[in-house]
Amino acid sequence: MIRKAVAVLVAALLLPAGPAAAAFADTAAPSWQPRGEAVRGEPSTADAPGLTAGVLYRDTLPPGEDARRYAVQLDATSSAYLAVFALPRPGSEVAFGDGVDLSLESTDGTRCDSAYRTFSGDGAARPLGTWVTRTIGADEPCQQAHAYILSVTRKFAGTSDRAPWPLQIRLTTEPALLPGATPGPAASAGTQTPAPAAGTARGTAGGTDFAGAARLGAGVWKDRVRPGQTCFYEVPVDWGRQAWIDAEFANAPVTGTGGFAVSGVRLEVYNPRWGFVTGATGSYSGRQTSVTATTGTVAYANRWESLDKVSAARFAGPYYVAVTVHRDVAGLVRGALPVTLRIGLEGEARAAPRYDGDPTADLGLPGEDGSGGESALRLAGFASLGTGTVLLLSLAVWAASARRRAAG
């Protein structure tokens, strides 16, 4: 009897804490909550706060204000990557052209890089990110050891939600190759689409952000995504390999007189340093549809190619897949939408370039432990338990021990 009670109690206590548990207790879709060190970007470059590589930062971005600016000090040998994600509240009003505009300049006014991303759909609120880079190379700008300024501007339509957007900001660096090391050739994007992965689908549960992304390999995976929700998945892609992701959105009973949601379903891919690789969208009316995206073949020399999708596939590591269902789908079907992810890995794995240092040194994220974040999530779950719950767990363990001693 005691053993049964202990088992029931322990099973209850090991239910997921945080967003996974909230999904059962609350109708609001779980969403990316910014974490890390708080920072406040300033309009003036003279007051711009400094960013350190490997530290995750959070800020906010109100509408109708000057750019938020941040300072970074870069050496003359390491490439640097600054990724910024805007995190509007799920379901909030955004316009087609709303988005984030990034610029990286040296303090002498030299433009190193710029990037601009929009939601590309009215009402398509979701985590929206892109990156700017300082790439080391003979024909690249901004090669000197120097102070640089990251500027982040919010593009805003007057009809959109005026609430400040939370920001997640990440600076990472990549060491140079060893003297005499050759990077090898660039890899083309490829034109042939392989057959979608086949086999028995395995269940998964996408995370709310990159740190909590569900780790997937080649094969077939099933999940459910609610209208207004974005789920994240992680796919490891080695040097010389390319990932193909096919997202199938199942048919579902419609609730009204019909219609469809433009850009109702969306698939996006990001590289290990959160750089946007590519994306695809499709309309949804309650009938099954699918969209496909690819990482491009991973090669070091891709960084000097002009096509963005190829240039972003410049490192091996975890590539992140984001699946979004538009909020308007809630007016067409009931509940979450079943999604099947078919993931294929093409090409032969190659040896890594010979780096002069560890290229993954500052890639760690809160919640990760090197094995899928599982242990860290368990620790976070126990850390969130109240004192009374911990006492109950202790009593359960004590009772089990007492039972074993009595049997002895």
Image (cartoon, grey):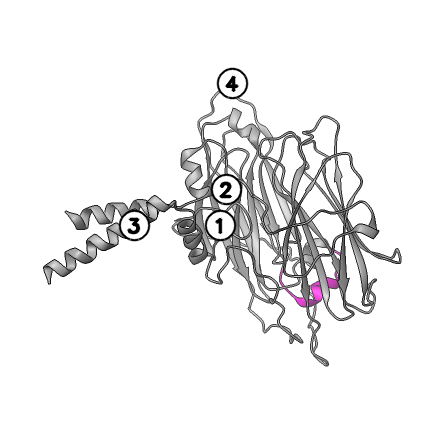
Q: Residue 303 in magenta? A: yes
- Name the mark on residue 284: none
Q: Secondary structure at mark 2?
A: strand
- The CA distance from mark 1 to mark 4 is 32 Å
From the image, state whether disc 4 or disc 3 is nearer to you. 3
Give me the residue at 83% from left, 66% from top.
Answer: 139
Residue 261 or residue 324, whichever sits in front: 324
The amino acid pointed to by label 2 is Glu
Dots 3 and 2: beta carbons under 8 Å? no
* Horizontal side, residue 32 vs residue 116: left or right: left
Dots 1 and 2: beta carbons under 8 Å? yes
Disc on the earlier residue, 4 or 3:
4
Q: From this viewpoint, which residue is outermost toward the bottom?
A: 180
Residue annotated with mark 3: 393
Q: Give neighbour class at mark 2: few <14, some 14-19, many 20+ (Cα, 10 Å).
A: some
- The CA distance from mark 3 to mark 2 is 42 Å
Residue 236 or residue 143, whichever sits in front: 143
Q: Secondary structure at mark 4?
A: loop
From the image, state whether disc 3 or disc 2 is nearer to you. 3
Report the quarter where the C terminus lies. bottom left
- The CA distance from mark 4 to mark 3 is 52 Å
Report the span colored magenta. Answer: 297-307
Q: Quadrant of residue 174?
A: bottom right
Residue annotated with mark 1: 342
Number of callouts in the render?
4
* Horizontal side, residue 239 vs residue 131: left or right: left
- The CA distance from mark 4 to mark 2 is 24 Å
Q: Secondary structure at mark 1?
A: strand
Q: Give neighbour class at mark 4: few <14, some 14-19, many 20+ (Cα, 10 Å).
A: few
- Name the mark on residue 257: 4
